[in-house]
Image (cartoon, rainbow, N blue to C red):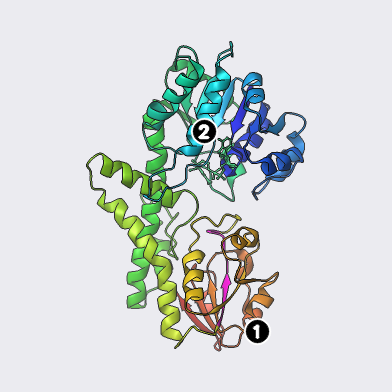
Amino acid sequence: MKLSVIGTGYVGTVTAACFAELGHEVICVDTDEKKVDMINSRQAPIIEDGLDEILKRNVGVSLHATNNYEEAVRNTDFSFICVGTPSDIDGNIDLQPLKNACRCLGTNLRNKKKYHCVVVKSTVVPKTTEDVVIPIIEKESGKSAGSEFGVSMNPEFLREGKAVYDFMNPDKIVIGGIDKRSQLCVKELYDKIDTNVSITDLKTAEMIKYVNNSFLATKVSFANEIGNICKLMGINTYEVMEQVGKDFRISPHFLRSGAGFGGSCFPKDVRALIGKSIELGYDPKILQSVIELNEKQPLKVIDILKKKMNKLEGTQITVLGLAFKSGTDDIRESSSIPIINYLLEKGAYVVAYDPLAMNNMRNVFSNIRYTSTIEEALENSDACLLMTDWDEFREIDNELNLMKRKLVIDARYVLNPNDIKADIKYEGLCW
Ligand code: NAD
């Protein structure tokens, strides 16, 4: 089957590459020329396990990229909208990229005779497909949704870092549609994937994605709250959660206390659901607490640092880990960001290392030192903050000896507290 993917960021590139790998013909469309060129030269614009290999196999054969909507709409039967839906200043989602994509799709559908199905994969608050996407496309194309073109909503649940695996091995596929035809033709695209496919209406599909992310974010904030309480009593929350997670009703996932969740999804999706609830006259207390606790959690690292050091001005602080989690180069809403901001404000000299995310962080902080090894990052430092649970940070015993003052604050349970050498002053965030 032939499909186009609009927006080739994390979700779009993985979607396009995996559909091509499943045997479909795919055209990627992005307004960012650099991304278009990268894909056409078989290079992934993002770092994801296995993605480069899939692009190498498929680009030039069943996949190519362009900035030309006309070419993409004319030559395909589906268009998956995968543009970003970032938070605006009020916490609601910014629909501008989505609206722009819809306008371009609509204009190019005007003269198309063949049936075309528009599939929203971007995360959008319930009723956005009905209230925003459909009216724009109908206006620009002069056609009626349902009878003259199809509309589906197919949320994405992939985890960054494991995105290719997750696309190919999902727990579920959710397909919302304006009508049976829109639902079933999208289902057919996934025929080779062996999983549960659930068919529903547009707004239910949109809501499933928000509830999925909001529940996971709630679980993380809950684990962090318990971790903060455990810390006050000298209890290791990881030992507690290991046992709690054995209860099948709870599951062991997302119970790891730390410096808060980040990334492009949890914070913005919970905020958007809060915004929508308030707009409807409902006060979403649990969701509000989830965000409130998450915003305060990184500052717990600072609280410990301040207790251990008289002043930060003129000190050298190493930040190990910049990505919002291991396995990705994504730094969006990473908890390292508020911490580095605070350290710089207080006059500390910040040295940072991350195996994948330093290039992205350079766009946020050009005034800190990035090193190419963990050793360089730790040399002569007064304190080390472990902010991302990269595997390579688990064996840094020898490197810690390079520090001036050996204070280590572990925000992610990277080191085993039982194995810490006597001369290291080790503090866990929640244990
Ligand atoms: P992203 O910012 O990485 O990528 C968006 C891409 O869209 C960019 O390459 C941008 O240049 C392009 N774009 C913007 N406007 C365009 C237009 N008018 N026409 C063509 N291209 C355009 O975003 P992302 O992280 O891939 O997220 C995309 C959507 O998927 C969001 O709604 C997000 O919430 C959702 N989502 C993300 C993840 C994730 O882990 N990143 C997981 C599930 C769902």
Mark 2 sits on what residue?
100
In this rendering, the answer to whether 73 lies above or below 264 is above
Q: Which is nearer the eye, 424 or 15?
A: 15
Residue 115 highlighted magenta (yes or no):
no
- Mark 2: amino acid: Asn
**Front disc: 1 or 2:** 2
* Residue 251 visible in the picture: yes
Q: Which mark is residue 402?
A: 1
| Secondary structure category for the residue under label 2 | helix
In this picture, is 254 found above or below 101? below
Residue at screen point 51% across, 28% down: 102
User: Of callouts 1 and 2, which one flags the residue occurring earlier in the amino acid sequence?
Assistant: 2
Residue 279, percent from left and from top: 27, 41
Residue 322 shown in magenta:
yes
Asked if disc 2 is less than 8 Å from ligand 1, the answer is: yes
Give the x, y percent position of residue 331.
Answer: 55, 57
89 to 107, vertically: above or below = below
- Is 42 left, or right, of 428 in this rendering? right
Q: Is residue 205 above or below residue 180?
A: below
Q: CA distance from mark 1 to mark 2?
A: 52 Å
Compare residues 256 and 78 and report the one nearer the observer: 78
Quadrant the C terminus occupies: bottom left
Amino acid on which the number 1 mark rests in the picture: Leu
State which region is magenta.
316-325
Q: Secondary structure at mark 1?
A: loop
